[in-house]
Amino acid sequence: MEKRTIAQAVVEVLHAAKQPLSSADITQAILDQKLYAFSAKDPKSIVRGAIDRRCEGLNRKDSIEPKYFAKTSEGKYRLKDN
């Protein structure tokens, strides 16, 4: 398994999907494709947190730059427009 961060795994999943996905769908794709090895009991919450920290428009005190993701009005995530 190639060493990558959760955010990098999410980018790979969203790039391949070419459509917005829920955090549950993103997590399942990461697990199915073995893009990241989770040690947590609830990987979906870990993925959602990693996405939200790099999601534009969400004002979290633990935000990280650069922003990779955007949240749709349906609550799904997509890659941020460049």
Image (spheres, helix red, strand yellow):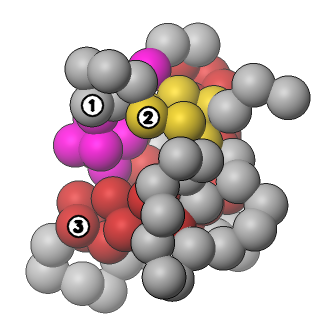
Residue marked by disc 2 = 71
View extreme (right): residue: 82
Tell me which amino acid carries mark 2.
Lys
Q: Which of marks 3 and 2 is in front?
A: 2
Image disc number at residue 75: 1
N-terminal-most mark, 1 or 3: 3
Tell me where residue 42 appears, x and y as whole percent: 15, 72
Residue 36 in view in this figure: no
Q: Residue at x 31, y 86 (%)?
A: 39
Q: In which quarter of the image is residue 11?
A: top right
Tell me where residue 59 appears, x and y as whole percent: 48, 64
In magenta, the rendered stretch is 20-27
Q: Which of marks 1 and 3 is in front?
A: 1
- State the separation of the CA atoms marked 3 and 2: 16 Å
Q: Where is the N terminus found, in terms of image quarters?
A: bottom right
Q: Residue at x 24, y 84 (%)?
A: 40
Q: In this view, does 14 lie to the left or right of 26?
A: right
Q: Is mark 3 on a helix, strand or loop?
A: helix
- Pick whichever, 66 or 41, lies toward us: 66
- State the separation of the CA atoms marked 1 and 3: 15 Å
Residue 69 in view in this figure: yes
Q: Where is the C terminus found, in terms of image quarters?
A: top right
Tell me which amino acid carries mark 3.
Ser
Q: In which quarter of the image is residue 81?
A: top right
Residue marked by disc 3 = 45
